[in-house]
Image: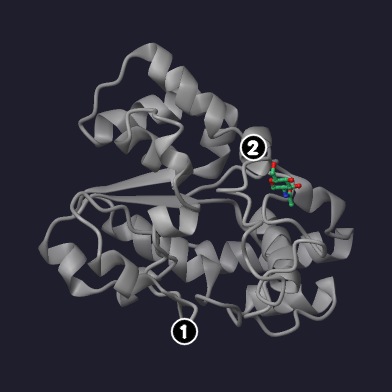
Amino acid sequence: SEILDLIYNNGDVEKCKQDTICKRVPFMEMIIPGVQNGVEDLKKMQSPRLVKTHLPVQLLPSSFWKNNCKMIYMARNAKDVAVSYYYFYQMAKMHPEPGTWEEFLDKFMTGKVAFGSWYDHVKGWWEKRNDYRIYYLFYEDMKEDPKHEIQKLLKFLDKDLPEETVDKILYHSSFDVMKQNPYTNYTTFLKARMDLSISPFMRKGILGDWKNHFTVAQYERFEKDYEKKMKGSTLSFRSEI
Ligand SMILES: *[C@@H]1O[C@H](CO)[C@@H](O)[C@H](O)[C@H]1NC(C)=O
């Protein structure tokens, strides 16, 4: 979201500090009565609008397909998502208690988590990628070569920015800078909604943290199940680089 907002503001960092990331790029389906309403926030905005969603492909409102909107889908390898989600569940209080890591991993594998099965989610969007204007972006590629990925995004968006602007965007969207930016680190959220002292929103931003969490037994069970669930798909992820 931050990268796209920076792109649409031609790298003007001050403009991107006029409001929190959740207001600049509303989270469409996030509706908490009296507190936040993504749909209402979006209605007040003018085109071109940046919309954030976590919806699985089959739940996306049909107007997105009809209007041929450009979409960027960000996917990340399952094991790192499971770990990241475990911490997010603990601090973002709109979720039920995640239980132990072992228990949460079970829920993740059976799709009993917010927004459903990771496996169906990534496959669902993957299958649509050639029929619509979908840019399927891998978190791992973004970590490996963020500048190259931003340049590819610019191409997808038919945007042309000078290299110094790209470098500026690169710097301001880096993990360390965003972690210290109150407009992106969720510090303005009420503690009752997100308790950043349990786990910060910007937690580690690395690849392969699953290695610090999975036991050998969990890894083996996970991989066996993964193969079954992803069988027949051409989609493949890197869990390390
Ligand atoms: C968010 O940014 C503010 C301002 O730089 C900083 O004081 C705070 O520690 C950051 N929060 C987290 C959780 O990193």
**Residue 107 drawn at (x, y percent):** 68, 79
User: Where is 131 relative to 107, above or below?
Assistant: above
Q: Looking at the image, which residue is at 79% across and 79% down?
A: 103
User: Where is 160 relative to 223, above or below?
Assistant: above
Q: Amino acid at mark 1?
A: Gly
Q: Residues within 10 Å of mark 1 (few under 14, many from 20)?
A: few
Could you say whether the residue bearing mark 2 is in a helix, strand or loop?
A: helix
Q: Does residue 90 appear left or right of residue 42 in this picture? A: right
User: Where is 44 relative to 202, above or below?
Assistant: below
Q: Earlier in the sequence, mark 1 or mark 2?
A: 1
Q: Amino acid at mark 2?
A: Phe
| Residue in the foreground of this view, choosing between 99 and 208 | 99
Residue at the disc numbered 2: 175
| Residue in the foreground of this view, choosing between 158 and 80 | 158
Could you say whether the residue bearing mark 1 is in a helix, strand or loop?
A: loop
Residue at the disc numbered 1: 34
Name of the residue lying farthest toward the left: 66
Q: Looking at the image, which residue is at 75% across and 79% down?
A: 98
Which of label 1 and label 2 is nearer to you? 1
Give me the disc on residue 148: none
Q: How is the image coloured?
A: one colour
**Residue 208 drawn at (x, y percent):** 73, 44
Q: Is residue 213 visible?
A: yes
